[in-house]
Image (spheres, rainbow, N blue to C red):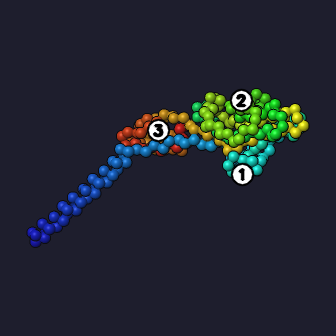
Amino acid sequence: MRQDVAGEMSKLTSLARAFMVVVLIAAGFLQFYVVNPQVTLASPAEYLTYPSFTGGTTGWTLSVTIYDSVTYQDTAGSIETHPATGRNKAATGTCTQTISASISSSDIVNLSLYWKKSIGVEMPPTLQILEVQIKKPSMGDWSTPVTIWSDTQIGDIDWTSVGPVNVSSYFDETGTYEYRYYMDTKTGNSANAETHIWVDNTSLDVTPPVVEKSVSQGITISDGATATLSNYRTVTQGIAISDGVTAAVARGRD
């Protein structure tokens, strides 16, 4: 009888030790994740609709400027402005879009695009101006647009890459912006003179700035991102968080 009791006690002791080992392993496993928090940085977001013009100009409003399915930088489709062939012919074209997402004055904004120019075989044109312009939220119309990038070269110039160029300083208001390509052209003094400007594969990348937030457990800290906290902490996007706090920050804007 005593041997049976002793055997049972031994089994219980072994089970208790095994349980303690499991608990210690689990604690160590959790501690591993506690000591190594993960923070997801905000990524640039494309704010233009159909910026590559592949297959069409959905989301854009064209005036004089046309869609060109034959001439393009890499995939079928670009926009083009050109006057009629002839002596001193002029054309001013635009391709405009209202940006659907609000841009904050503290956002980081980068511009990229490809452009191409052609002058034909006759006398060079007198105008081959390409500009990227914006209308700020406070502006009523396009009478005083803000030019954020431009090229005034004249010639036969193959596809040229621009950017990314930091244009954040021009976006100094918070709200809804309008964005457009402005092409001003005029042929030379020749009966067969011509000029063309194309734009393709554009981009307006917007990134929220790093924002510091004081948060507590379960509180939303930015645009749907949440932090799991053991107590009150200060969470900064992109900074490793100490004391076992983990956070997922998808966007840094308030």
Q: Are marks 3 and 2 in contact (CB under 8 Å)?
A: no
Residue of label 2: 146
Check the image and report above or below for 230 versus 124. Answer: below
Dot 1 falls on a residue whose secondary structure is: loop
Say left or right for 232 vs 57: left
Q: How far apart are marks 1 and 2 (CA)?
A: 30 Å
Q: In which quarter of the view is residue 194 placed?
A: top right
On the image, the x and y values in percent for residue 19 come to 25, 59
Q: Which of marks 3 and 2 is nearer the N terminus?
A: 2
Q: In which quarter of the view is residue 176 placed?
A: top right
Say left or right for 231 vs 181: left
The residue that appears at 29% across and 54% down in the rendered structure is 25
Q: Distance between the residues labelled 3 and 2?
A: 33 Å
Q: Distance between the residues labelled 3 and 1?
A: 39 Å
Dot 3 falls on a residue whose secondary structure is: loop
Dot 2 falls on a residue whose secondary structure is: strand
Single out the mark in the foreground, 3 or 1.
Answer: 1
Disc 1 marks which amino acid? Ala
Disc 3 marks which amino acid? Gly
